[in-house]
Amino acid sequence: MEITFYKYQGTGNDFIMIDNRQETFAKNDSRLIEKLCDRRFGIGADGLILLENDAETDFKMVYYNSDGNQSSMCGNGGRCLVAFAKQLGVIENTTTFTATDGLHHATISDDGIVSLQMKDVDNVNIEEDYVFLDTGSPHHVQLVDDLKNYPIKEKGAEIRYGKLYGQAGSNVNFVHQNDTDTFSVRTYERGVEDETLSCGTGVTAVAIAMKATGKTDSNEIKLNVEGGKLEVSFKEISGKYMDVFLKGPAAFVFEGSIGV
Ligand SMILES: N[C@@H](CCC[C@H](N)C(=O)O)C(=O)O
């Protein structure tokens, strides 16, 4: 059997996109999804996303990490799926779609910049040397010295599998402040079990955490990630964060078919 796929990337966080509107994809076959995401034996990606029909909105997003397991919200994946929906002719330049954490509104410009509304954030757990919050996926946020040389995979895995987060684990973001409103971020991703070049829910968590801890006064924050640049904006009222938007490029890379 042949599977037709489309490969996208958003600031280097890369995804296999499959049009599953006809419901032909074996969505419970985690071994198949893991193999498709494998960089040596498959197409290679940080995750796989199905675009499906939805009764209430333009389409539904179903997200899997590269380990083959379905997971929580993926911000960069959501941005790339908007670009894919446009390529398929499912939407034009604005959309509302359904994901695991609820409805998302988004716009896409003609040059492929996607602005995606993320879920509101009501709880920000501020601890002495880290912050934990859920921006659609769980995120640990920690400022570190010498981010460039920091052992992201080793330290990220320690925190992800450590006693703080139990069985479910967490994504782990290491951060350096560059300027009053600009931060560099490197992320260890749960379900990829390695550093990725960018994490959309991760930079969203960093932006909110930096505001919540007084590292910045800005509501429009620039995030430099290994794969490029992103922006996060929000409104804050009494410690609640709403109208949260993640903005940046989403690009088609190639398409093909693979025998399985
Ligand atoms: N890369 C994603 C995050 C994907 C989900 C994460 N790995 C998890 O399972 O929590 C993003 O851009 O947000």
Image (cartoon, grey):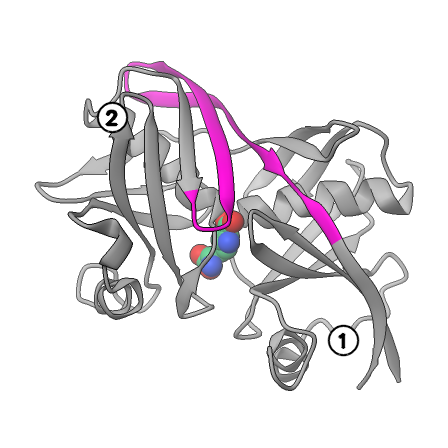
Residue located at (35% from left, 29% from top): 122
**Label 1 residue near ligand 1, CB within 8 Å:** no
Residue located at (44% from left, 49% from top): 137
* Residue that mark 1 sits on: 26
Residue located at (85% from left, 69% from top): 256
Mark carried by residue 212 = 2
The amino acid at mark 1 is Ala
Do residues under tags 1 and 2 come within 8 Å of each other at their CB atoms?
no
Q: Regarding mark 2 in the picture, which secondary structure is present there? A: helix
Assign the C terminus to one quadrant of the image: bottom right
Give, as a single range, the part of the protein colored magenta.
225-252
- Crowding at label 1, few (<14), some or many (≥20) Cα neighbours within 10 Å? few
Tell whether 155 sits left or right of 45. left
Per the model, the C-alpha gap separating discs 1 and 2 is 42 Å
Assign the N terminus to one quadrant of the image: bottom right
Which comes sooner in the sequence, label 1 or label 2? 1
Query: Where residue 11 sits in the image (x, y, percent)?
Result: 56, 47
Q: Main secondary structure of the magenta part?
A: strand
Tell whether 118 sits left or right of 97. left
